[in-house]
């Protein structure tokens, strides 16, 4: 598949747009959001259009991929690059956006020189595992197993729980499939099929002995536990889409998004409730009672991959924080792609 520059750019910027819209609604109830922003929630980027740690860490993942462009994507090439970039993020003065404790603890261990298998927070499946994985879904010309392994590795550097690993793989695949033209209405069934196929697959070359940090009896049973939680979350998305209720808080159907499988599920639901209107999908995602910035970031990444940068309002591209870095990643990932 040959990717389109506009869709890669749209996915990266869509993530940042959603993050910025949800930044000021996180921790608020829907009623509180509506009182502040009106009945449809936030519809315009704030001024200044600042993002959170979600976009900052996605930049680290994307810039790491661009850094190793031309080399084979393996755990040996990516783990040290991503580890270094995560530590740089943790130490940056810009890291003042209420970053997640799991990411900070893991990065502290990496900064102290611990191998990532020891630094990772093995019991955490927080949404930090997959809020940043979108760039892995935008890489052209890699095998299915490489995309899966890279998606799980970037999660595992900080979040060692199998549910976070599986959710990250599914998030990357959703992005990749939409980038390639998959119809939004086919997405949930495709993700469920992928989850069923991968239930007992453990990527030893990418994850090493991570599974031994758990109480599971084998690497395969470790992964089954994570995939089954994601399958249950995706089934909730399918059920909610049958109801097609655009008015009720999506978190009521698929969870508040603080953990990885719920962030994926609720972001998918917001996107798929408004499959032809990315702006409306972002408003709905930002007007949720849970982890609104992460939910809206992923919803924006999906919408941008499906419809491209021009699907979002004019003027946003120049206003969003880190626009230059987002542009550079898009350029680096699509050096030979058609417009």
Image (cartoon, rainbow, N blue to C red):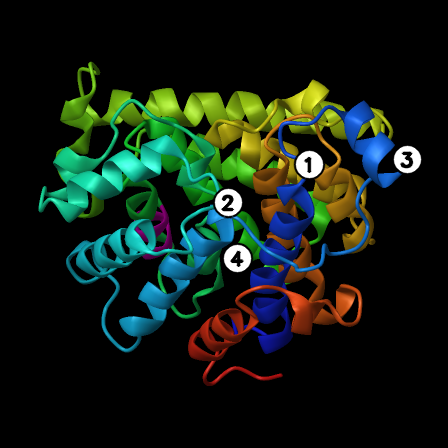
Q: Mark 4 or mark 2, which is nearer to you?
A: 2
- CA gap between label 4 and label 1 equals 28 Å
| Mark toward the start of the polypeptide (4 vs 1) | 1
Task: Point out the tag, 1 or 2, that comes first from the N-terminus.
Answer: 1
Q: Nearer the viewer, mark 4 or mark 1?
A: 1
Image: 246 above or below 146: above
Of the pair 144 and 316, the residue shown nearer to us: 316
User: In percent of the image, x 72 and y 67: which residue is there?
Assistant: 316
Is label 4 in contact with label 2 (beta carbons under 8 Å)?
no
Whole-angstrom CA distance, mark 4 to mark 2, is 9 Å
Distance (Cα) linking label 4 and label 3: 33 Å
Q: Which residue is mark 2?
A: 171
Note whether residue 29 is visible.
yes
Q: Is residue 215 above or below residue 198?
A: above
Q: Are the residues flagged by discs 3 and 2 in contact, CB closer than 8 Å?
A: no
User: Of discs 1 and 2, which sits in the foreground?
Assistant: 1
Question: Looking at the image, is mark 3 or mark 1 earlier in the sequence?
Answer: 1
The numbered mark, 4 or 2, whose residue comes first in the sequence reads: 2
- Badge 1 marks a residue whose secondary structure is loop
Quadrant location of the C terminus in the rendered image = bottom right
Q: State which quadrant residue 234 falls in.
A: top right
Q: Which residues are magenta?
A: 146-151
- Between circles 4 and 3, the one closer to the viewer is 3
The mark nearer the N terminus, 4 or 3, is 3
The residue under the point 22% across, 57% down is: 84
| 284 in the magenta segment | no
x and y percentages locating residue 235 in the rendered image: 62, 24
Residue 39 - label: 3
Residue underneath mark 4: 176
Q: Determine the CA span between mark 3 and mark 2.
A: 29 Å
Q: Give the answer, above or below, for where 164 lies relative to 89.
A: above
Which residue lies under the disc numbered 1?
Answer: 25
């Amino acid at each position: 598949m040959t990717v389109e520059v506009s869709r890669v750019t749209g996915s990266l910027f869509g993530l940042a747009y959603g993050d910025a819209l949800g930044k000021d609604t996180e921790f608020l109830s829907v009623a509180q959001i509506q009182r502040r922003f009106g009945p449809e929630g936030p519809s315009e980027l704030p001024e200044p259009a600042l993002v959170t740690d979600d976009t900052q860490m996605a930049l680290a993942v994307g810039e790491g991929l661009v850094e190793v462009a031309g080399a084979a994507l393996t755990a040996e090439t990516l783990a040290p690059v991503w580890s270094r970039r995560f530590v740089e993020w943790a130490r940056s003065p810009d890291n003042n956006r209420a970053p997640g404790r799991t990411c900070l603890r893991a990065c502290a261990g990496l900064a102290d020189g611990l191998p990532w298998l020891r630094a990772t927070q093995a019991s955490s499946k927080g949404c930090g595992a997959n809020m940043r994985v979108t760039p892995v879904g935008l890489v052209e010309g890699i095998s299915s197993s490489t995309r899966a392994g890279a998606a799980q590795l970037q999660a595992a550097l900080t979040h060692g729980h199998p549910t976070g690993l599986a959710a990250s793989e599914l998030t990357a695949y959703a992005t990749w499939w939409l980038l390639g033209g998959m119809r939004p209405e086919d997405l949930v069934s495709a993700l469920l099929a992928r989850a069923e196929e991968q239930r007992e697959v453990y990527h030893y070359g990418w994850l090493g002995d991570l599974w031994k940090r758990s109480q599971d009896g084998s690497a395969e049973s470790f992964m089954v536990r994570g995939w089954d939680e994601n399958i249950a979350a995706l089934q909730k998305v399918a059920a909610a889409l049958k109801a097609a209720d655009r008015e009720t808080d999506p978190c009521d159907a698929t969870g508040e998004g603080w953990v990885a499988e719920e962030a994926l599920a609720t972001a998918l639901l917001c996107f798929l409730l408004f499959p032809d209107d990315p702006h409306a999908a972002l408003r709905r995602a930002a007007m949720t009672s849970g982890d609104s910035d992460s939910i809206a970031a992923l919803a924006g990444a999906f919408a941008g991959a499906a419809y491209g940068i021009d699907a979002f309002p004019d003027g946003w591209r120049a206003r969003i924080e880190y626009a230059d870095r987002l542009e550079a990643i898009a350029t680096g990932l699509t050096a030979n792609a058609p417009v």
